Image (cartoon, rainbow, N blue to C red):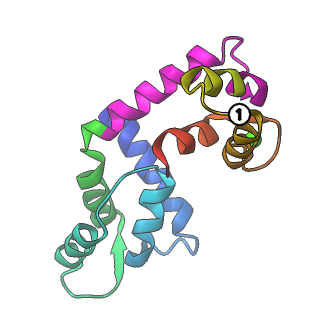
Amino acid sequence: MEDDEKTAMLRKTFQMFDQGKQGFIDANKISTILNTLGQNFDEIELQAIIEQTDEKGTGKVNYDQFADIVTHFLEDEDAEAMLKELKEAFRLYDKEGNGYITTGTLREILGALDDKLGPDDLDGIIAEIDTDGSGTVDFDEFMEMMTGE
Ligand SMILES: [Ca+2]
């Protein structure tokens, strides 16, 4: 991610959570935000960084503090690289560029990956992956399948 993109994304996220437009958000919302961003983080490390940043222990952070905290975790290049790989893998299966993979295609992929899986096993796995039961797997569902998050 370019720095400009990163800043724009952080601003947007901050504004989304600063619903009262007060210029600060609750520090305890940051773990939810990191989850929303699909960012891996260590809860203890996060708390330590929040405490460092929110020196007075107000439980709130302004945008600059928020950006510092989140950027600390976004610097995890491994996670970024993984997301890129996942997107490429998804594109490979989503040959027509529909933005989803049908569960039929997924069934073929899983069957090819593990020939010990029977039809019932595949049904169970697919029901777990296609969490909204739409009969298609979008990128979010695909990512969940691949990362277990
Ligand atoms: Ca779905």
Residue 134 vertical position relative to residue 47 in the rendered view, above or below: above
Residue 92 image-quadrant placement:
top right
Amino acid carrying label 1: it is Gly
User: Nearest the camera: 80 or 10?
Assistant: 80
Residue that sits furthest to the bottom in the current view: 57
Q: How many marks?
A: 1
- Indicate left or right for 44 with 38 as reference: left
Residue 120 spot, x, y in % from top left: 76, 41
Residue 22 vertical position relative to residue 131 in the rendered view, above or below: below
Magenta stretch contains residue 31: no
Name the residue beneath numbered marker 1: 118
Residue 75 image-quadrant placement:
top left
The residue positioned 35% from the left and 70% from the top of the image is: 62
Query: Magenta stretch mostly in which secondary structure?
Result: helix
Residue 131 spot, x, y in % from top left: 72, 50
Residue 91 in view here = yes
Q: Secondary structure at mark 1?
A: loop
How crowded is the residue under tag 1: few (<14 C-alpha within 10 Å), some, or many (20+)? few
Residue 24 image-quadrant placement:
bottom left
The residue positioned 73% from the left and 20% from the top of the image is: 98
The residue positioned 26% from the left and 75% from the top of the image is: 47
Residue that sits furthest to the top in the current view: 95
Query: In this picture, which residue range is highlighted in magenta?
Result: 79-106
